[in-house]
Image (tube, rainbow, N blue to C red):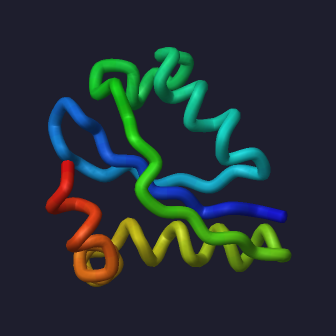
Amino acid sequence: MYHVYVLISLKDKRFYIGFSEDVLQRVKEHNSGKNVSTKNRRPFKLVYYESHLSKQDAMKRERYFKTAKGKTTLKQVLRNSLAKL
């Protein structure tokens, strides 16, 4: 299985969107500073993920979430969760 995940930085309140075969391990890596692109934005909280059988489908969904329309969709879907942060 391939997972698309959305993290929110508790520091700057911005999303980080990625995909992985092991979401929980990937979140640990982000929070431990092993990812250079997110090291200065820690800590992160996992706010959303979805699973796909196909790597290509997961990559396509990740690309969509990184667009302006995709981010708008995420904000609408997560509006109650984001309000609690």
Q: Is residue 60 above or below residue 6?
A: below
Q: Position of residue 4 (x, y in %)?
A: 60, 63
Total numbered labels placed on residues in the image = 0
For the point 59% across and 27% down, the residue is 28
Q: Is residue 4 above or below residue 22?
A: below
**Quadrant of res 17:** bottom left
For the point 55% across and 18% down, the residue is 34
- Nearer to me, 11 or 63: 11
Q: Is residue 6 above or below residue 13?
A: below
Q: Position of residue 1 (x, y in %)?
A: 84, 64
For the point 56% across and 63% down, the residue is 49
Q: Position of residue 55 (x, y in %)?
A: 78, 68
**Quadrant of res 42:** top left
- Nearer to me, 77 or 57: 77
For residue 26, side relative to residue 81 (left or right): right
For residue 24, side relative to residue 82 (left or right): right
Q: Position of residue 65 (x, y in %)?
A: 41, 72
For residue 1, side relative to residue 8 (left or right): right
For the point 70% across and 50% down, the residue is 20
For residue 11, side relative to residue 52 (left or right): left
Q: Is residue 14 above or below residue 39?
A: below
